[in-house]
Image (tube, rainbow, N blue to C red):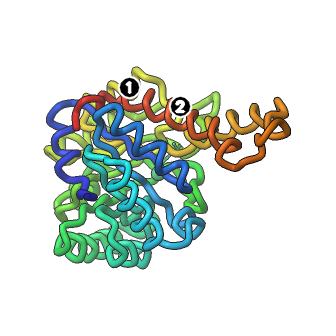
Amino acid sequence: MLVSATEMLNKAREGKYAVGQFNINNLEWTKAVLLTAQENNSPVILGVSEGAGKYMGGYKTIVGMVNGMLEELKITVPVALHLDHGSYDGALKVIEAGFSSVMFDGSHYAIEENIAKTKEIVEIAHAKGISVEAEVGSIGGEEDGVVGAGEVADPAECKLIADLGVDMLAAGIGNIHGQYPENWAGLSFDALEAINNLTGTMPLVLHGGTGIPADMIQKAISLGVSKINVNTECQLAFAAATREYIEAGKDLQAKGFDPRKVLAPGFEAIKATVKEKMELFGSVNKA
Ligand code: G3H
Ligand code: ZN
């Protein structure tokens, strides 16, 4: 059964590790993440962007697929199904469709409007036991059409949003979606520390988890980060493994064109990436 992300993130915050949010794109992605979580006895969050939601046929399709896998693959670790960077309307739709967690990303609004809309989503979601993530500041780069300027969050604004009763808070701290450029200045730990000091025990969320060096991940966790989002890294691993299969001409060999064979190397590459992240984040054996 899907669970809200609240309990797993509060436990992570207390135990000084982070739960990975891995974005899903199709059946193979979903199955790879769920099986890896089960094999590593790790809680996990399946992230769905609005673009991926449309691609997969709609939110109800995803809820049906994930619930079916939880039962038939015998997944017993805690799993949350979470809308990633949701709009106000998107958040309402997934709440109706049966997601167990939602991010309302109001970071592009003025703070007053971000507060007003986040407050409404918190009331609606909490009435159904669904956890809520909000965002302050912004994540640089682009993810599935969501473009951010990369403004470092104002700690006082973070406190205003945290006080609305959200279950987790994403704050821009110099993190970027996609691959980090060579000249990236790194995470702003001064900002993270100030946000952590002002928001008490709020689980903080680190977006743009692809390619952040291990020492920065550890330091971020020590400063309250309890959820880390990874998307691009699984996509890169999937694409590289699929390319290798095709370039080696394996699709031309006996039955090698069977989609279950063509997609298998990418599936295994996602599993390896997710396992590596779970080990780095410290969530193995924390289910
Ligand atoms: O919301 C999802 C993430 O922040 C993923 O970022 O694609 O850089 O790993 P990433
Ligand atoms: Zn993100």
Residue at disc 1, secondary structure = helix
Q: Which quarter of the figure is the C terminus placed in?
A: top left
* Residue 106 shows in this picture: no
Tell me if residue 276 comes above or below residue 37 in the rendering: above
Point 61% across, 43% down: residue? 235
Q: Which quarter of the figure is the N terminus placed in?
A: bottom left
Residue at disc 2, secondary structure = loop
Residue lying farthest to the front in this orientation: 254
Q: Nearer the viewer, residue 218 or 97?
A: 97
Whichever of labels 1 and 2 marks the residue nearer the N terminus, that label is 2
- Residue 76: x and y in percent read 26, 46
Which residue position holds label 2? 211
Of marks 1 and 2, the one in the foreground: 1
Image side of residue 178 versus residue 152, left or right: right
Q: Which mark is residue 226?
A: none
Task: Say what amino acid the circle numbered 1 marks.
Answer: Leu
Tell me if residue 283 comes above or below residue 89 in the rendering: above
Point 30% across, 61% down: residue? 101
Which residue position holds label 1? 280
- Label 1 packing within 10 angstroms: few (<14), some (14-19), many (20+): some
Tell me if residue 72 comes above or below residue 52 in the rendering: above
- Residue 232: x and y in percent read 57, 43
Task: Say what amino acid the circle numbered 2 marks.
Answer: Gly
